[in-house]
Amino acid sequence: MRLFTGIALPDEIEANLERLIEDLRPTARVRWSPVRNLHLTTKFIGEWPGDRLEEMKRALAGVPSPGPFDIQVRGFGWFPNPHNPRVLWVGVHAPDALRDLARRTDEAAAKLGVVPEKKPYSPHLTLARIGDPAPLLELKRTIAGMPSDEFGSFRVDAWHLYLSQPGPSGSVYTRLSDYPLNAK
């Protein structure tokens, strides 16, 4: 089974991002993310044996909570860069509590043998993946001309363990466990 941990988006943010994707879709032939799949990944675990799922759940339940925190969803960016992009993303702005949660989750999974992250944590929401070099001038112009690049904010009071399963129209994500962010 393929696992990751993440934070779910509230309906209002999903609706804002769905409108954004619908506005941008005609400007470029790229693989747009299904809105139902948008989430904020805190740790990609990868392949994990099904018979060890409860062990992973217990390890994640032991991750110290940073307490609830607020996130703002705003701004655009490109990975690895705007000149040769492979991913279009929307920014996630949060206090250090988000990075602490990602680091602690990484540490808990590493104790079970999951490879720790090598790159610094970079919170974002992937809007589109760019396969073969695609003409992106119209997409970039549309983004530059938008009246606002703010898509909302929300309070994070829990994070989740997800199962990712390939499907005919993209991956299907299923929530396996919920981990509340209790106040300190």
Image (spheres, rainbow, N blue to C red):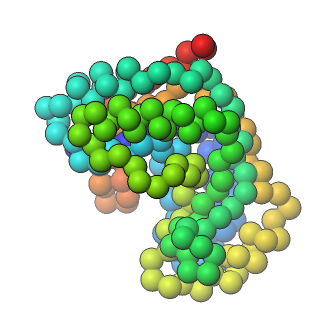
Q: Is residue 53 above or below residue 83?
A: above
Task: Residue at 57%, 49% (x, y): give it.
Answer: 123
Q: Position of residue 177 (x, y in %)?
A: 37, 26
Q: Quadrant of the N terminus?
A: top left
Q: Is residue 104 above or below residue 29?
A: above
Q: Is residue 108 above or below residue 37?
A: above
Count of residue discs: 0
Q: Is residue 38 visible?
A: no
Task: Residue at 74%, 69% (x, y): give it.
Answer: 143
Question: From the viewer's perspective, is 151 left or right of 32?
Answer: right
Question: From the viewer's perspective, is 166 left or right of 67?
Answer: left
Task: Residue at 56%, 39% (x, y): give it.
Answer: 99
Depth order, front residue of 50/34 = 50
Task: Residue at 31%, 55% (x, y): give it.
Answer: 167
Please identify the residue farthest to the right as the structure is shown. Answer: 147
Q: Position of residue 48 (x, y in %)?
A: 22, 42
Q: Position of residue 91 (x, y in %)?
A: 66, 53
Q: Is residue 31 above or below residue 180?
A: below
Q: Quadrant of residue 135?
A: bottom right
Depth order, front residue of 110/38 = 110
Q: Quadrant of residue 175?
A: top left
Question: From the viewer's perspective, is 87 left or right of 43?
Answer: right
Q: Quadrant of the C terminus?
A: top right
Depth order, front residue of 77/20 = 77
Q: Position of residue 146 (x, y in %)?
A: 81, 65
